[in-house]
Amino acid sequence: MGEQKFDVLPRGVNQQAFLKAVEAFRKLLGDENVLTKPEQLIAYMKIMMPVDEAEHAPSAALTATTVEQIQAIVKICNEYRIPIWTISTGRNFGYGSAAPHHRGQIILDLKKMNKILHVDPELCTALVEPGVTYQQLYDYLQAHDLPLMLSMPAPSAIAGPLGNTMDRGVGYTPYGEHFLMQCGMEVVLANGEVLRTGMGGVKGDNSWQVFKWGYGPTIDGLFTQSNYGICTKMGFWLMPRPPVYKPFSIKFDSEDDIADIVEVLRPLRIAQIIPNALVIANALWEAGGANVRRTQYYEGQGVTPDDVIERICADKGIGQWNVYAALYGTREQVAVNWQIVTDAIKALGKGAIITEEEAGDTEPFKYRAKLMQGIPNLQEFGLYNWRGGGGSMWFAPVSQARGSETSKQMRLAKKILNKYGLDYVGEFIVGWRDMHHVIDVLCDRSDPAEFKAAYACFQELLDEFERQGYAVYRVNTAFMERVAQSYGPVKRRVEHAIKRALDPNNILAPGKSGIDLETFKG
Amino acid sequence: MISSKYIPIIKIRPIIVGVVFSISLSVHAEDSAQPRDGEIVYAKICGYCHDVGIGPNIKDRQLPPEYIHYIVRRGLRAMPAFPEPYISDEELKQIGRFIY
Ligand SMILES: Cc1cc2nc3c(=O)[nH]c(=O)nc-3n(C[C@H](O)[C@H](O)[C@H](O)COP(=O)(O)OP(=O)(O)OC[C@H]3O[C@@H](n4cnc5c(N)ncnc54)[C@H](O)[C@@H]3O)c2cc1C
């Protein structure tokens, strides 16, 4: 093993130093938990972004299962200045997947650290390790017959609550803004110390998963979308499963309806009449979810013509916009709220409500209804068959929940995407007062022209939206530095001051959200 | 390069797993040393796409184990790649036997 030559090395680390570090990792974790061969690392290299995979090639991957091992790993990383990119379940598709921010970083893969440490059925809380998947937690709740509901992102079965929440992801139940429901974290710092946030530092405490703020500065947020620590445990809240669950959809026929839809739904959402993170999905997003492939309808190049989209809508019973929302509660509560919702749509004078009974077994209603109830599935991967070729980047600008804004953003995004021959495939995920306007910039990675167009398109989307005062809430690894610039120089200086204080050797995920002591010159 | 005279202080201390509540359900882990049954892994991961027309049907097609290994580790178009800590080599063999 000692003679191994490494094809990929971390920035500024030579073969000899890297070999020493690898030997130290092997001693600590055992050979089987230190992956360095190209055929072992290939599984971390499938990025969906239209950039060269080599730019994101890891030099090695480690798997750890205990906090003590992670403490010892950061010690070795400090000694040899090895940058480490932590993943929990590593399913960050469209944001960089499991690949590191840049070439040469070592992956710390915590998938095997997968204990469900605690579920409290009365206080409705959970405490999990990084490798726990939503499916695992779902099966656990089912097996123990616990009347609790999970909130999960669309790649639910294979993703995990800790990784998703660390990247401030979203789900579709009333607990859909996941970081809002997070309560208590354990974090290994770059110097090896173990920090517990909130009430977690108090000896003998039993409120870690029920009171978020603790005392003094509340610092959980600092560890999300950042590189200040390695999260090894996360607490979060679970929703009690309601006696009645009523999912529904509202179909709208015109693309121009988006403004009215938002105006009618916002008051219902803010007042919690509709309590969940409802979505408003456009026709092509729906087509993907209904297993439609573009080639079934259109063999041409470039943007899908409007008449083709209309044909798909007619064939599949899809609207130009499709709202998915649900009511939760007792029979009486749901009946009252249902009346309010149906009255509001009637007063609007457009939009066809579809109930679960009417939708029957059809997609995409079926998978949406599952997501809003916290039942795992992967139906939304149908999006990648729409165009084919495996390329995807999420462009996810934040919008006010205001009709004029959503309409403006939709038109702007569509114009730019179409200019590059790409389709607008978008949805709005409604928070309380905001919307995540999530657009899947889909491309065929095997088509060099489309690959190039998608990259240029993403750049222009970021530039144009920034000019109009918008920015994204999260982005893939290729564009993290660019997006950090949108949020202004003072924030960046503060972020780097914290980085210098907590991780002076820059070993934890340099580049994440644009935080990198080596490249930042501000 | 960053020049720092920083010497890391590593305090290794045992971590108490879990918090003791009065009503607490026991710690549950998937035993990563023990391969999961092929049928279960198929149902909890692969089947979600391959049984519903998102991915092609892969059952009863006598797919060679080497081919399954190759595709799962690399992914293919819409299909993500799964590294060894996610689905082990042994589990892949068992999936292969199950869908054969
Ligand atoms: C079809 C499709 C639909 C999608 N829909 C959604 C959706 O509805 N909502 C949504 O949020 N996303 C969605 N995604 C994006 C993504 O797949 C999910 O967010 C997924 O949950 C992220 O992967 P993960 O949970 O495995 O987290 P990971 O990949 O493990 O983690 C995500 C990131 O968090 C950081 N991180 C992870 N673990 C740690 C740790 N222990 N310590 C410190 N930092 C850490 C790392 O930077 C890592 O890259 C979708 C993707 C696809 C393909």
Image (tube, rainbow, N blue to C red):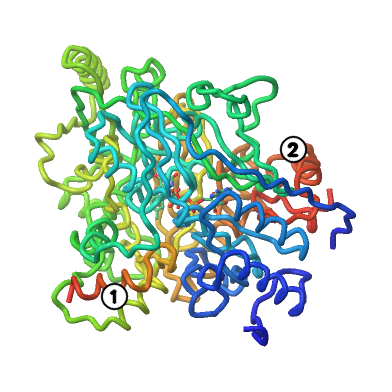
Task: Tell me the quarter of the picture where residue A498 sits.
Answer: top right
* Residue B93: assigned label: 1
Callout 1 crowding tier (Cα within 10 Å): few <14, some 14–19, many ≥20: some
> Where does the image place residue A154, in percent across and percent down from the top left?
35, 47
Eyeballing the image, is B31 above or below A29?
above
Task: Tell me the quarter of the picture where residue A78 sits.
Answer: bottom right
Output the chain of dot 2.
Answer: A
* Residue A509: assigned label: none
Specify the amino acid type for callout 2. Answer: Lys
**Residue furthest out toward the bottom:** A3
Q: Is residue A257 left or right of residue A74?
A: left
Position of the N terminus of chain A, as image quadrant, is bottom right
Residue at 40% x, 47% y: name it.
A426
Eyeballing the image, is A33 above or below A353?
below
Q: Is residue A410 visible?
A: no
Residue at 34% x, 21% y: name it.
A122
Residue at 32% x, 57% y: name it.
A381
Q: Who is closer to the viewer here, B13 or A403?
A: B13
Specify the amino acid type for callout 1. Answer: Lys
Residue at 61% x, 51% y: name it.
A68
Output the chain of dot 1.
Answer: B
Which residue is label 2 attached to?
A491
